[in-house]
Each structure stands twice: as structure tokens, then as C-alpha cells.
Image: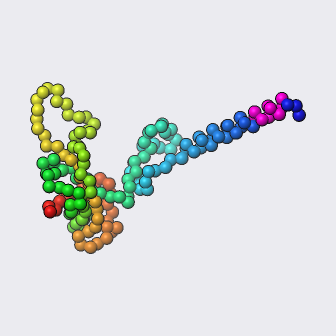
Amino acid sequence: MSKAQIQSAEATVESAEAQINTVSTQLKNTRLFAPCSGIVGKRWLMPGDIAQPGQSIFSIVNDQKLWVSVFLEETKLETLHIGQPVLFTIDTYPDATFMGKIFTIGSNTASQFSLIPASNASANFTKVTQRVQLKVSIDGMTDGKKLSDYRILSGMSAIVKIIRQ
């Protein structure tokens, strides 16, 4: 075998290894990993669709961390604090009273990040009481029943009573 044939064969081997690395990288990019375990709430792509970088494939609901979102008027926030007890009922289970605590008080009003922010181009000012999001944990039941006996889903409506301390 001549020196030229050996160099050509080595170049062919290097090219094949580069192709293997390229295919291996492409194969790794075909796997999708969810940020948490849970239930797929909505699929944005169907089988056969091509996903673009940064595009949402599905919405996932973490079924291990449940909470109740409360949008409370800013005028009622003065005496609230993290850890304050809360009682609430869920419309699906009107006879069951759930217990929880405030674990997050929002850092902004709901209108601050709305898709279509209010424009005050006319220089007229109308004062509107804003709402701030609170998150309330779902810790248990007042009657001692198990939370696992109830199927709580994302988007359910609740009636919330914050216990003043």
C-alpha cells in the first residue's frame, strides 16, 4: 500500500468519525425532557409537526405542587404576611374545607405585566384598585380527611377566607 493510499484511508476514517459525531449530536437533540413530573395540560404540537428552537411543545401541570392563586385588591394587603393561615372551599367539593397558608405575596400588580397594558395617552387619570397575586398552599382538610381523596385540578374555582392574626 502506498503512502498516498494510507493518507487517503486515514482521511476517510476521520470523515466517517466526524459524520458519526454529527449524527450522534443530532440524535441527542431529538430527546425532550420535561422540567418536572406532572400531567400534560395542553399539547401545542401534534405528531409529524416540526418543532422550532424555543417553541412550546406542551404545557405541563406539576401535580405534586398544588396551590391556590388569589388576586387580592391592593387595599387589603396591609395586614397580610407569609405563613398566615387560610381556609378555602373548591366549587367542585362545596362541603369540604381545605387549609393552607400564604406562601407567596406577589411583587407586582396583575396589570403590570398584562398583554395589553392600559394606555393613559389622553392625560385623564382614573384610579383603579389593582390586584396582587397571593399563592396559598394546600396543606390539608379541616375535618381530618386526606387530600388524596380529592381530585384537585388546575383552573378550579375556590372561595378563600384569610384568617387575620
Residue 3 among those drawn in magenta: no
Which is nearer the eye, 56 or 151? Answer: 56
Left or right of 31, for residue 12: right
Where is residue 100, by image quadrant?
A: bottom left
Left or right of 28, for residue 52: left
Give the extent of the magenta segment.
4-12
Q: Residue at x 38, y 60 (%)?
A: 64
Q: x, y percentage for residue 77?
A: 16, 51
Residue 11 among those drawn in magenta: yes
- Outermost residue toward the top? 122
Q: Residue at x 24, y 51 (%)?
A: 105
Left or right of 63, for residue 79: left
Q: Residue at x 45, y 38 (%)?
A: 54
The quadrant of the picture occupied by the N terminus is top right
Q: Using the image, determine if residue 37 lies above or below residue 56.
A: below
**Residue 65 in view here:** yes
